[in-house]
Image (cartoon, grey):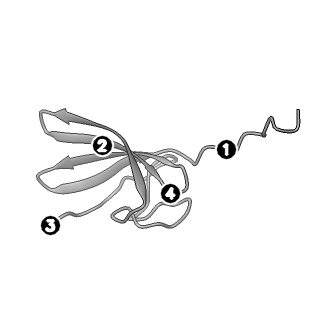
Amino acid sequence: MTSTTGTTGTTGTTGTACPHCGWPDASEPFQVVSRHNTAAGRTVWTRCGCGSLQVRVVDGLGTHVVSRSRPAEARPSSAGR
């Protein structure tokens, strides 16, 4: 069984969904950016569908989003230059 919890703070989460787009943390779509094994389990960096970068810790208790960024700001296109 996988549980998803989070921390609070300016870059953390207040529940089990992305505070920027509302998509549930335990659902797809998210893109796995990298995975790293640790002594306590695994750290997985993912990107939410809205672009928010998330740090997830996978251990014996399940998967926990421990930190997340704001979605990347859209950069102006250079097509008109």
Q: Residue at x 49, y 46 (%)?
A: 11
- Position of the N terminus, as image quadrant, is bottom left
- Compute the Cα span from label 4 to label 1: 14 Å
Q: Taking 5 as reference, is 42 above or below it?
A: above
Q: Is residue 51 left or right of residue 76?
A: left
Pick the residue in front: 68 or 49.
Answer: 49
Q: Residue at x 52, y 47 (%)?
A: 10
* Precedes in sequence: disc 4 or disc 1: 4
- Compute the Cα span from label 1 to label 2: 23 Å
Pick the residue in front: 56 or 11.
Answer: 56
* Mark 2 and mark 4 residues within 8 Å of each other at the beta carbon: no
Number of numbered discs:
4
* Precedes in sequence: disc 2 or disc 4: 2
Which marked residue is nearer to the observer: mark 4 or mark 3? Answer: 4
Determine which of the numbered discs, if any, sits on residue 44 in the image. Answer: 2
- Compute the Cα span from label 2 to label 4: 16 Å
- Furthest toward the front, the residue is 79
Task: Tell me which amino acid carries mark 3.
Answer: Met
* Mark 3 and mark 2 residues within 8 Å of each other at the beta carbon: no
- Compute the Cα span from label 4 to label 3: 24 Å
The kind of secondary structure element at disc 2 is: strand
**Residue on which the image places disc 4:** 49
**Residue on which the image places disc 1:** 73
Residue 25 percent across, percent down from the top left: 38, 61
Residue 6 percent across, percent down from the top left: 35, 56
**Residue on which the image places disc 3:** 1
* Precedes in sequence: disc 3 or disc 2: 3
* Precedes in sequence: disc 1 or disc 3: 3
